[in-house]
Image (tube, rainbow, N blue to C red):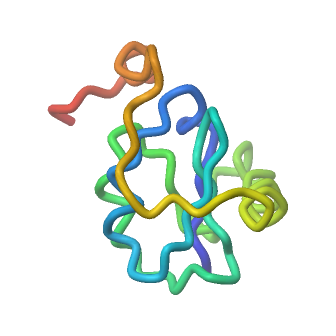
Amino acid sequence: MPFVVTDNCTGCRFTDCVEVCPVSCFHGDDDRVYIDPVACIDCAACVPLCPVQAIYEDLDLPEEKEHWTEVNAEKAPTLPKIIKKQPLLEGAEERMEALGFSRDN
């Protein structure tokens, strides 16, 4: 099953995850990244690199985040691929702290 980027990515767009993706399935807009479920090979290499725990296997999504499966499937193919780490969005560190995470987690 493919992996899904959820709302924890919004406003941060930490992109540590994109560099380890062997099939370049990440796409992004000005606020976040999405995973193309057709391209994703379910390797899970991206999951431990997300400092805000925004990436889930679609079968493991909490019920309140299940709609992100459809959002990723719709948005990813319409956006440019991201294959290299990007600069953090302004306020990303503060957003990470507000979500209860730190670089030490």
- The mark tally for this picture is 0
User: On screen, 100 above or below 2?
Assistant: above
User: On screen, 8 above or below 19?
Assistant: above
Q: Quadrant of the N terminus?
A: bottom right
Q: Most extreme residue toward the bottom, as rendered?
A: 41
Q: Which quadrant would residue 30 be assigned to in this image?
A: top right
Pick the front one: 99 or 30: 30
- In percent of width and height, residue 82 lies at 51, 58
Instruction: Judge from the rendering whether residue 52 lies leftward or rightward of residue 6; answer left or right.
Output: left
Instruction: Judge from the rendering whether residue 7 lies leftward or rightward of residue 54; answer left or right.
Output: right
**Residue under the image location 62 percent in, 46 percent down:** 6
Pick the front one: 74 or 6: 74
- In percent of width and height, residue 14 lies at 40, 40
**Residue under the image location 45 percent in, 23 percent down:** 99
User: On screen, 100 above or below 94?
Assistant: below
- In percent of width and height, residue 27 lies at 61, 59
Q: Quadrant of the C terminus?
A: top left
- In percent of width and height, residue 89 lies at 47, 26
**Residue under the image location 49 percent in, 74 percent down:** 24
**Residue under the image location 59 percent in, 40 percent down:** 32
Q: Which quadrant would residue 34 be assigned to in this image?
A: bottom right
